[in-house]
Structure formats: structure tokens, C-alpha cells
């Protein structure tokens, strides 16, 4: 069935070209050794690319409002999951507790670059 | 089999096929989100995994990102064609998308084989366990998408069920977006 | 209607096993759920007999060894939640009621609906097969915490453990598929004139439950894959010595596990709402209040999960936060109970069997809710966690949900589903036997739990502080209550089966209810409505002043009301 919301199709090839350029930026960034630059190009670019795909290819911004609300809500729940679990799993010590196995792994791992070490 | 009346109604204004696709995508966000959140917590808490992560093939990952982005382009061009009523062209673009998926999986297979040969197997370490699980789950979704697309392309070629072209495209874009985040998480982040 | 133009009458296979008709699929879910309910009930019988009469052969089972005990309690919990409560409350009632109550012919995607049952059926087969493999069914408790669940050397049921996981994941996939179908159908398939606020409460709440399920199960699917890999492929996702963390599983499990209890609660509350309104002949008090409260509960349910982990070793500061949110969530639930009581106030109450069940739901769930407050306070929970107090609390919530709520719905909609009336006398015997039996099972367990009885212990004679005779008397009393409760299901089973052929034939609207399913024949024909209805009002216009009838069906056009 036809869908009036898509009467206007943006120039998809142009969008694709921008995405490829962004990909190149993130790869080039990874070749440097400036940590903050790598992180910004890698993840910043990822967020921008995701937004461009969502907006231009998936037409999320011209969908009925409920759709982006639904998707954002799911993302919020994932942030919530992270916030509730990371204090126990990401951190290795807290109020009256310590994850000594993990602490040891971090210690010995950072001394050692062997691949089979966890 | 003809469609149920429930299917053809649209009290929300969104056709049912597209609406259910969005709900499926929403549920996939939390599946991948859960796995990604678990990985992120471990990765941030274990900086020593960096030495393992250094062994993923960044160029293969970048190439695969390019492949998926391009296949997303062909998927949305298929949608544009279907929107214009041109089923044959939509089918052509969908099949290009499937080809993109196949290339992606082939590169993945090559990567995995190389990594396994070097001793980086699934149980080899925390990083590798997550790496294979994340890329494996993603790869399964790529494969599933390809199979569904095959069926929809066959119908589209006969100018049937053209509305499904957009829906499978939405799913494919989602799979692309997941990879957009997997790439920096597994290949770049140090 | 195009679906009725099929030339030949379909054969048994097409009609009953390969059908896409939502009513048939609902029956498939219902019967599978009921059979699994018998299995789950049998398992409870066996382990309660062991607890009352330790180390004696249980009739119909044999000797309960510690390993077998673990498997019994694990499978009892797993089956009751995932293979009884979910399929009956969510899938069976959802499938049967949603298209009928919104005035359409079927689900938006009937073939996906059929697929969801087929996956569910397959998951049932996988789960039941685990009883037959070497080592027997999984014995690591329904919460499956690693390392117990990850290492076969610990749980002694390695094959059962993996089959259990696979069955559970398949069940999740089935309900994800079914759930999105329900949501899309309710959103899109409504009859002309039926606004979102004209939906019967049970439809709203099943839809909300499906959304909650979908939003919460994802991380556990991920976690289950990780556990399966730990079990079978030597990964260490949950092994601290390998860089993993067992707490991660607990968090992933309960992030789903807590919303899940509301996923099963909401349909039951919806059923009770509809039954109360019909048999009080009174408009549901505060429709929007209930709805917004249900939404608030749904959202809040995502921020309370770690109250299951207060003594697992989580950071105490997280325990503070989760304690506060847990106490807050009792407010919307309490509000719903008050609103239901307000619905009854001033009503013209008919004590039919469905109404008895609905009233019992309110009373019993109240006990469950109130005892939850003790457990939600992290300080008190230090003592009460993992005792029988917890078991009694959650059975005072789960049994109202999965047993009382189900029977309210079954006795209410049986005429519509099967075209016959059930026998009221048998219904009342079933009711009283179940309710009395149920309370006799669990009130003693509050006492023994507070007195120190730990969960998952197969024989208290081994623990001197718990081996006291007064406690053993209470355990035995609990078992006797269970025997009464189980025996009381016999009149129900007989009633159910006998009424199928010999019950009084049901007219279209024997309860004089307003909702759309009662405007068609009992049972409804394929396609439901010969002519698709239009809706003019909400579902709860009972006792409207100025009308000659005390009810006003949704599809009856508006009229000028007489001045009273």
C-alpha cells in the first residue's frame, strides 16, 4: 500500500557517501595514538552514523511519534540496566566488598601482553 | 491465504506490517543491548583485555562496515523502487543487499578462521568469549535477514506484497546499526 | 468475509493442529498450560510429601533423594511460571479475547500466531525431555545461578541443565512473537469507534504485559546464551577466575524476573476487573486510574529488581536504592486494590463462581502484597531471604495470579469458549476446596519461614535448630493443605470435561455483559463477526441511570436516556 510519508525520498547515495566518509574518519582516528581522539572518532562517528541511518534510511523522524519514543525507551532501559549492574560488575570493589579474582586479573594482565591471558 | 481484517485495519495510521517490524526491532534492541551492556561493563572493568582486542583485524572490520553500509543503501533503494510500484527493480536491489550480506559473512568467516588458527578461540579469554558471542549473534541476524529477504524479493519480483520490502529494509538497517556500534567496540576501542 | 468463502470444511489437521484461528491457538495454549499445571502440581505433591514424611517412599514417585529434591523444586517453579502462568494468562486469554473484544476477525498476523504456538510447543517438548536424559531434569533451582548452573560437576544434571536453558529461551522467543502480534492487533485492529479508552481492561493489561515482557527479556536471552556457552563451550562469562562475574547472571535474570511477575499479574488483574464489573452490575471505578496505575507499575517494575539480590553481595548502597523503589511500587498495586473495592461498593453483587474467584483474588493477593513489604526492606530481608517466608509471600501473589485469576477467567469465559455453561455447584465446591486448601498450605509456611526454615532443604531432620516437632507439625499441616487443594481440582476437571458435552447450552450473553465477545454466538464462528461491529462507548456502562436495562453493550447505538 502506498504511503504518503515517503513521497519525498532524500538522495540516498549522498547519505551513503557521507557515511563512508565518516567510516574513513573513524578508521583514520584509530591509526593515531591519541586516546581521546580515537574514542571520539570511533564512538562519536558511530553515534552520528547510527542517527543518519535511522533518519534517512529508516525514516524514523517522519514516522508517527510513537515509534521514536518506543525505540528511545528501549535504549533508556538499557542505560538503566547498565546503571544498575555496573556498580557490581564493572567495579571490582565497593562498600565492604572486593572482587579479588578480577583485581588480580587486571594486575597481572596489564603486566603481560600475551594473547591467551585473560 | 487472504489477510485477516485485523491486518488490514490501521487505527494508528501505521500499516500493521511496519508496526510489527518496529516492535520486533524494539525487542532486538534490548537483546543486543543486554549483551552489549554486559560486554561494556566487563571491558571497562578489565583494561587488560586491550591486549586481546589488539588482535582483531581492524581492516576486515572496516571493510565489513563498508559492505553493510552499502547493503543498507541498496535496501533503501529497494524500498524507493517498491514505493514507486516497481517490484522488479525492488527485487533486484534486495538481491544486491543479500549479496552484501553474503560478502559480510564470508569476511567474518575468514576473520574467525584466522583468529581460531592463532589460538584465539571462544573460551580463550573474556574478550574472545564476548567477541564471538557478539559477532555470532549479529551474524545470525544477518543470515536470518538474508533468508527473509530472499522470500520477499521473490514476491516483489511478481509485484506482490511490495509493502514488505520496506519492512525487511527496516530490519536490515537495524542490523547495520548494531554493527556500526560493534565495529568501534570490538575493533577500534583500545 | 473472505475467510469464510473456503469451499471445503477443513480436516482435523488443518482445523485443530495447523490452524491460524486465534481461538484454536488459544485452546492449544490453554490445554498445554493445563496439562503442565498438572505436572507442576504433581511435582509439588512429591516434594511436600518428602518434607512432611522425610525419607519415606512417596506414593506415585518413590524415594526422594537430595538430588531428586533439587530437580523437583527447580522444575516445579520453572513449569508453573513459564509453562502454566504465561501460556494460560497471557497467551490463551490474550489469543481468545483480544480479537473478539476489539471487534475483529483474528490477529493481525495469524500465521505468526501459529508459529508462536509451534515454538512454544517445541519448548514444552524440550523441557519435558529433560526428565528423561542422563542425570534427569535440571536441579539448579529455577533461578539457575552460576556456578551451580554452569558446572555439571556441581548441579549433577548437566544434560538437564542445557535442555532447561534451551527450553526457556525457546519459550521466550515464542512469547516475543506472540506478544508483538497482540500489541499490533490491539493497536491497529480495533473496531471503528473503539478508542484506546474503550478497550476492556483485560485487553489493555495483556497488551501492557506483552510490552513489559518484550522490554525485559532481551538481556536474559543474552545472558542465557552466555550461560549455555559456559555450560557447553568452556567459556567463563560467569566465572570470576576467568574474568567473568556470577553477579552478572543474577542481575540479567532479575532485570527480567521482576517485570515478569507483573507480566503475569496484569492479565489476572484485568480478568478480575472485568469479572467484578459484570457481577457487581456496576461501572468499573476509575478506569483511567487503573490504567495509569498499571503503566506506573509497569515502569516501576523495571527499577526494583535487585531486591532479589539483597544478600547476594551487591553493593549495600545499591540495596538502599532498590529498597526504596520496592517500597514505592507497593503503592500503585494497593491503589488498584482500593479501586476494585470501590467498584464493589454500592454494586448489586451476584455471587457466581467467577465472582467468588475474583473476590478471593483481592483478599489473597492483599496478603501477598503486604508480606512483600517485609521482604522489600533490605534490613528485614537479611533475615528472611531464602526462608519459607519468601516462598509463602510469592505463593500468596502467584497463586492468586495463576490459579485464582485463571479460574475466574475460565469460569467466566467458558460459556463463550465452549458454548456450554459450567455446573455452579461443582464450581463452588472447587472454589472452597482450593481456597481453604491453599491457605492451609501457606500460612504455616510464613511461620516456619520466620522460625528459620531455609529454602531448598530436602530434610529438616538434618538441622537440629529446625528439627523441632512443632515446626514439623506445621510442615505436615502444609502438606495436608496441598492434598486438599489438589483433590479439589478433581471437581473442576470433571466439571470442565463433563460440561463440554452435557452442560446447559450457552446463549450468546449469559452474563449480560457489555463487551463485544458476548455479541456473537457461543462459541464464536470462524471469523467471529458476521458483520464487523461499530463501537459507541466504553466497556463498563452498567447500571446507567435512565436505561431500561442494567447494561449497555458497546455495539448498541447511542440513545436518548429517560429521565429517572
Image (cartoon, rainbow, N blue to C red):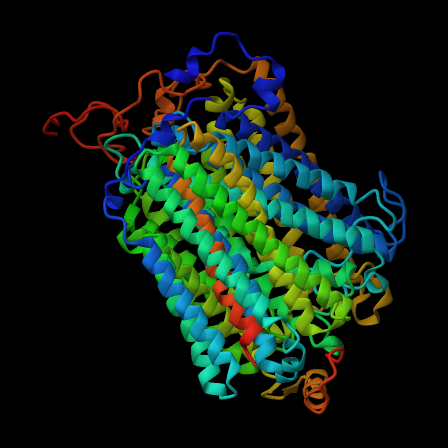
Residue B12 at least partly seen: yes
Looking at the picture, does residue C448 appear above or below residue C541? below
The residue under the point 83% across, 60% down is C152
Query: Picture quarter containing residue C154?
Result: bottom right
- B38 above or below C418? below
- Residue C487: percent from the left, percent from the top? 70, 35
Which image quadrant is residue C219 in? bottom right
- Farthest residue in the top direction? C8
Q: Residue at x 66, y 82 (%)?
A: B51
Residue B152, image x, y percentages? 48, 36
Q: Position of residue C95 (x, y in %)?
A: 48, 33
Number of numbered callouts drawn? 0
Quick one: A27 or C548, which is closer to the camera? A27
Q: Residue at x 53, y 30 (%)?
A: C26
Residue plotted at (49% across, 61% down): B66
Instruction: Indicate left or right for B165 with C420 as reference.
Output: left
Q: Quadrant of the N terminus of chain C?
A: top left
Is residue C296 visible to the viewer in this orientation of the structure?
Answer: no
Q: Is residue C462 above or below residue C268?
A: below
C443 or C269, which is in the foreground? C269
Residue A47 in the image: x percent, y percent?
Answer: 40, 69
Towards the viewer: C24 or A59: A59
Quadrant of image for the C terminus of chain C: top left
Q: Quadrant of residue A104?
A: bottom right
Amino acid at each position: 500500500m502506498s504511503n504518503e510519508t515517503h513521497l519525498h525520498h532524500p538522495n540516498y547515495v549522498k547519505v551513503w557517501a557521507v557515511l563512508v566518509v565518516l567510516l574513513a574518519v573513524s578508521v583514520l582516528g584509530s591509526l593515531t595514538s591519541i586516546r581521546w581522539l580515537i574514542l571520539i572518532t570511533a564512538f562519536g562517528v558511530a553515534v552520528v552514523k547510527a542517527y543518519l541511518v535511522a533518519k534517512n534510511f529508516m525514516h524514523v523522524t517522519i514516522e508517527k511519534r510513537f515509534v521514536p519514543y518506543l525505540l528511545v525507551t528501549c535504549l533508556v532501559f538499557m542505560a538503566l540496566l547498565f546503571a544498575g549492574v555496573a556498580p557490581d560488575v564493572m567495579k571490582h570493589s565497593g562498600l565492604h566488598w572486593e572482587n579479588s579474582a578480577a583485581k588480580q586479573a587486571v594486575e597481572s594482565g596489564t603486566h603481560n601482553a600475551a594473547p591467551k591471558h585473560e | 491465504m487472504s489477510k485477516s481484517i485485523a491486518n488490514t485495519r490501521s487505527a494508528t495510521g501505521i500499516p500493521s506490517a511496519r508496526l510489527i517490524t518496529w516492535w520486533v526491532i524494539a525487542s532486538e534492541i534490548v537483546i543486543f543491548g543486554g549483551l552489549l551492556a554486559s560486554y561494556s561493563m566487563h571491558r571497562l572493568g578489565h583494561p587488560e583485555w586491550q591486549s586481546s582486542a589488539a588482535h582483531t583485524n581492524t581492516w576486515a572490520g572496516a571493510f565489513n562496515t563498508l559492505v553493510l553500509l552499502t547493503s543498507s543503501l541498496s535496501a533503501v533503494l529497494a524500498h524507493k523502487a517498491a514505493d514507486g510500484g516497481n517490484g522488479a527493480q525492488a527485487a533486484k536491489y534486495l538481491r544486491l543487499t543479500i549479496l552484501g550480506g553474503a560478502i559480510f559473512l564470508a569476511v567474518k568467516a575468514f576473520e574467525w578462521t584466522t583468529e581460531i588458527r592463532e589460538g584465539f578461540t571462544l573460551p580463550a579469554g573474556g574478550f574472545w568469549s564476548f567477541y564471538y558471542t557478539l559477532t555470532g549473534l549479529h551474524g545470525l541476524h544477518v543470515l536470518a535477514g538474508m533468508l527473509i529477504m530472499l522470500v520477499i524479493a521473490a514476491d516483489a519480483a511478481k509485484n506482490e506484497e511490495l509493502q514488505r520490502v520496506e519492512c525487511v529494509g527496516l530490519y536490515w538497517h537495524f542490523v547495520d546499526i548494531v554493527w556500526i556500534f560493534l565495529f568501534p567496540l570490538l575493533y577500534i576501542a583500545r | 468475509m473472505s475467510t469464510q468463502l473456503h469451499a471445503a470444511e477443513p480436516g482435523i489437521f488443518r482445523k485443530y493442529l495447523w490452524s491460524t484461528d486465534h481461538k484454536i491457538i488459544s485452546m492449544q495454549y490453554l490445554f498445554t498450560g493445563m496439562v503442565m499445571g498438572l505436572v507442576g502440581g504433581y511435582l509439588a505433591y512429591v516434594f511436600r510429601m518428602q518434607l512432611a514424611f522425610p525419607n519415606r517412599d512417596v506414593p506415585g514417585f518413590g524415594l526422594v533423594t537430595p538430588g531428586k529434591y533439587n530437580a523437583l523444586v527447580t522444575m516445579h517453579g520453572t513449569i508453573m511460571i513459564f509453562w502454566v502462568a504465561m501460556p494460560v494468562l497471557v497467551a490463551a486469554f490474550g489469543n481468545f479475547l483480544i480479537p473478539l473484544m476489539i471487534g475483529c476477525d483474528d490477529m493481525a498476523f495469524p500465521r505468526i500466531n501459529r508459529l508462536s504456538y509451534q515454538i512454544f510447543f517445541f519448548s514444552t517438548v524440550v523441557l519435558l525431555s529433560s526428565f528423561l536424559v542422563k542425570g534427569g531434569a535440571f536441579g539448579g533451582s529455577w533461578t539457575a545461578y552460576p556456578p551451580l548452573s554452569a558446572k555439571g560437576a556441581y548441579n549433577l544434571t548437566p544434560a538437564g541443565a542445557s535442555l532447561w536453558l534451551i527450553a526457556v529461551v525457546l519459550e521466550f522467543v515464542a512469547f516475543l512473537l506472540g506478544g508483538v502480534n497482540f500489541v499490533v492487533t490491539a493497536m491497529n485492529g480495533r473496531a471503528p469507534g473503539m478508542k484506546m479508552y474503550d478497550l476492556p481492561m483485560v485487553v489493555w493489561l495483556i497488551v501492557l504485559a506483552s510490552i513489559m515482557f518484550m522490554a525485559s527479556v532481551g538481556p536474559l536471552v543474552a545472558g542465557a546464551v552466555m550461560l549455555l556457552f559456559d555450560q557447553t563451550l568452556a567459556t567463563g562469562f560467569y566465572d570470576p577466575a576467568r574474568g567473568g562475574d556470577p553477579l552478572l547472571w543474577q542481575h540479567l535474570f532479575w532485570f527480567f524476573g521482576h517485570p515478569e511477575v507483573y507480566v503475569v499479574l496484569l492479565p489476572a488483574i484485568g480478568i478480575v476487573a472485568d469479572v467484578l464489573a459484570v457481577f457487581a452490575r456496576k461501572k468499573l471505578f476509575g478506569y483511567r486510574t487503573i490504567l495509569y496505575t498499571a503503566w506506573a507499575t509497569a515502569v516501576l517494575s523495571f527499577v526494583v529488581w535487585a531486591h532479589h539480590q539483597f544478600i547476594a553481595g551487591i553493593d549495600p548502597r545499591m540495596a538502599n536504592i532498590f529498597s526504596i523503589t520496592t517500597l514505592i511500587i507497593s503503592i500503585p498495586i494497593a491503589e488498584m486494590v482500593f479501586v476494585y473495592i470501590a467498584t464493589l461498593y454500592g454494586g448489586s453483587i451476584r455471587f457466581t463462581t467467577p465472582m467468588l474467584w475474583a473476590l478471593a483474588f483481592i483478599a489473597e493477593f492483599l496478603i501477598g502484597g503486604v508480606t512483600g513489604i517485609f521482604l522489600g526492606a533490605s534490613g528485614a530481608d537479611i533475615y528472611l531471604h531464602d526462608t519459607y517466608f519468601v516462598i509463602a509471600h510469592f505463593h500468596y501473589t502467584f497463586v492468586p495470579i495463576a490459579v485464582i485469576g485463571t479460574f475466574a477467567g475460565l469460569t467466566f469465559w467458558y460459556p463463550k469458549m465452549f458454548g456450554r455453561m459450567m455446573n455452579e455447584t461443582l464450581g463452588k465446591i472447587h472454589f472452597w476446596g482450593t481456597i481453604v486448601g491453599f491457605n492451609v498450605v501457606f500460612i504455616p509456611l510464613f511461620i516456619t519461614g520466620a522460625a528459620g526454615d531455609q529454602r531448598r532443604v530436602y530434610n529438616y531432620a538434618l538441622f537440629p535448630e529446625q528439627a523441632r516437632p512443632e515446626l514439623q507439625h506445621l510442615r505436615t499441616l502444609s502438606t495436608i493443605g496441598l492434598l486438599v487443594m489438589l483433590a479439589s481440582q478433581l471437581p473442576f476437571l470433571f466439571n470442565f470435561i463433563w460440561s463440554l458435552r452435557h452442560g446447559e447450552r450457552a446463549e450468546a450473553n449469559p452474563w449480560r455483559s457489555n463487551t463485544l465477545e458476548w455479541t456473537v454466538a457461543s462459541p464464536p464462528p470462524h471469523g467471529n463477526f458476521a458483520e464487523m461491529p461499530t463501537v459507541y462507548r466504553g466497556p463498563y456502562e452498567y447500571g446507567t441511570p435512565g436505561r431500561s436495562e442494567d447494561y449497555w453493550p458497546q455495539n448498541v447505538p447511542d440513545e436518548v436516556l429517560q429521565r429517572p
